[in-house]
Each structure stands twice: as structure tokens, then as C-alpha cells.
Amino acid sequence: MKTKLGVLISGRGSNMKALAQACDEGRIPAKMAIVLSNKKNAAGLEWARSHGIPVEVLAHGDFPDREAHDRAIVRQLIRAKVDWVCLAGYMRLLSPDFVEAFKHRILNIHPSLLPSFPGLDAQAQAVDFGVRVSGCTVHIVDAKLDHGPIVVQRSVEVLPSDSADDLAARIIVEEHQAYPDAVRLLIENAWHTNDRRIIWGAN
Ligand code: GRF
């Protein structure tokens, strides 16, 4: 049975698309089983629907609190028999119960070289700080924001003339490479974690 991915989005969904294409082309030995969004008008949903990927919208405003919303998402992921959860521009913090339900099986992509510039507007943070190099990070999700063990990072140069949008455009190209690479590495290889580190090979 092929590994099943569940992808959570809130917007454009270009990383979701990169993952779906990598699955279709056999670069990731997996199938995208479901795309979930907390926003009914997330642009990425249309692309997913038109490519035959099952889509569910669970608007967070329809739930009394984060925990109830997350429980509904976890139910959908379990129903879709998802092995891995990929956050792809999903603009919600996950509750501890969600992280625990898929422990070490939730990935996130962030547009900076963590631990620099976690949180919102990472590209603008990098430009404002004046760093010469930035990039993207794919990491396993733990209880803290943009924090868990790092799987893949790719770097890009920051040019003196860069706006945050210029830098974001350069980083997103690397994101579309890094996310499929990270998923493939984790699916195809034995690995375990040692505190913050991913150690390749059986425990
Ligand atoms: C990406 O920059 C990702 O790193 C961040 O949110 C953005 C989502 O873009 N978490 P997209 O929706 O995948 O196009």
C-alpha cells in the first residue's frame, strides 16, 4: 500500500501542488489522500479538486475553539487513512492533541533558515534584518511554533535590492524542491530522532 499524505492549506497551495506533482511523477512514493483547508476560498482548493484529490473544508469559525476544530481535522485525516500530514501554508497553530495524534508524522515548511525568523512574514524579517543568506526549512512539527527537528534546508542569496516579495519569489522555488525531497527522504529511509536531530538509520 502506498503511503498516504494529507495536506493542510489556507491559501495559494503552491507547495501542495509541488507535493501532488511529485507524487504523480513518482518522485515521492506516496499518494495525496486528502487536502484540508480552514478557509473555504483557499485558492489551492480549486487546483486540488480539478486534479481529483479529495478536498474537505473545515472553517475554524464554525467550531467553538481550536481544540474542537483540530479534533474534526484529525478525524478527517484518520478517516482518509493518512500516514503523514504536510502543513503547506496552513495558517493555524496546532493544538497539542493534534501534534500528539500524529506524533513525528506532521511536517511543516517555513520560508526561512530556522531558527532564524520564525512566525509570520519570515521573508520581510530577513530583509529587514539585513541577512545575506536566507532560504527555507522543512521540519517535523512539535509543540512549539516553527521549531521541531529539521529535515531539509535550502538556501538562497539575499540581494541588497531585494524587497520581501523579491526574496519570497526566490525562496518559493526552493520550497517546491525541498518539500518533496524531505517527504521522500522520510518515507524511503529508516530514521529516528535524538532530541532535535533526525538520525538516518534504524534506532
Ligand atoms: C510558503 O512560503 C510556506 O513556506 C509558508 O507559507 C507559504 C505558503 O505558500 N508556510 P503556498 O500556499 O504553498 O503557495
Image: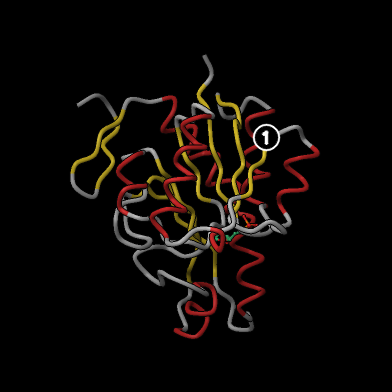
Q: Quadrant of ligand 1?
A: bottom right
Residue 168 drawn above or below residue 28: below
- Residue lying at 40% horizontally and 69% vertically, measured from the top left: 118
Viewer-nearest residue: 156 or 163: 163
**Residue 66, percent from left and from top:** 42, 59
**Residue 145, percent from left and from top:** 36, 63
- Residue lying at 57% horizontally and 53% vertically, measured from the top left: 175
- Residue lying at 36% horizontally and 50% vertically, measured from the top left: 141
Residue 34 drawn above or below residue 113: above
Tell me the kind of residue under disc 1: Pro
Viewer-nearest residue: 45 or 133: 45
The residue singled out by tag 1 in the image is 54
Label 1 secondary element: loop
Work out which quarter of the rendered image holds the C terminus and state it: top left
Viewer-nearest residue: 189 or 61: 61
Residue 107 drawn above or below residue 40: above
In the rendered view, does 48 fall on the left or right side of 126? right
Q: Is mark 1 within 8 Å of ligand 1?
A: no
Q: How many marks?
A: 1
**Residue 116, percent from left and from top:** 37, 70
**Residue 17, percent from left and from top:** 68, 44
Mark 1 surroundings: few (<14), some (14-19) or many (≥20) residues within 10 A: some
Check the image and name the residue furthest to the top: 1
Protein image colouring: secondary structure
Viewer-nearest residue: 64 or 72: 64
In the rendered view, does 142 fall on the left or right side of 109? left
Residue 26 drawn above or below residue 177: above
